[in-house]
Image (cartoon, grey):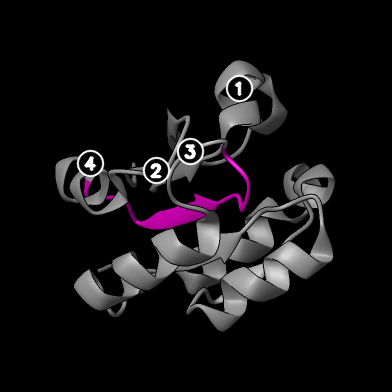
Amino acid sequence: MPKLPLVLVFDDDLVVHQDHLAGQPARFVYVAHADHCVAEVATHRPDLVLMDFSMHATLDGAEAVRLLRAAYPTLPIVGISSDSRMNRLIIEAGAHDGVPKMMLPERFRELLHYLPSRP
């Protein structure tokens, strides 16, 4: 049986509402803020990162994506802000895509195409 992809979710709301992505074909690790995003990625080695813009922390989502992109140039990253303007900023910072948070459960399987092919 293939191993489910690991998704690292940087979002203060989804840390509390982890059921938002229940039933999706993935394993999830939730982090409330992205202040230590590079270290979190190094620790967890995710297949995909979901990044909110506003997390009431030192870094916003766009700044975090810039740091991640510098350290992990090929890591799939998707913005998940509720505000499309914020997702645009995350994409401009280097994310592959942006999905409104409320649409994430319906669109999650589409995001898996950003994962590298597995043997």
Residue bearing the label numbered 1: 18
Q: Nearer the viewer, residue 3 or 100?
A: 100
Q: Amino acid at mark 4?
A: His
Pointer 3 local density, CA inside 10 Å: few below 14, some 14–19, many at least 20? few
Q: Which of pointers 4 and 2 lies earlier in the amino acid sequence?
A: 2
Q: Magenta segment range?
A: 45-55
- Residue in front for this viewpoint, 102 or 117: 102
User: Disc 3 vs disc 2: which is toward the camera?
Assistant: 3
Question: Where is residue 104 drawn, in percent x and y?
Answer: 74, 48
Residue that carries the numbered disc 4 in the rendered image: 44
- Label 3 to label 2: alpha-carbon separation: 30 Å
Residue 42's spot in the image, x, y percent? 16, 50
* Residue on which disc 2 sits: 4
Residue drawn at 57 percent across, 30 percent down = 12
* Residue 71 in which image quadrant: bottom left
- Residue 49 drawn above or below residue 66: above
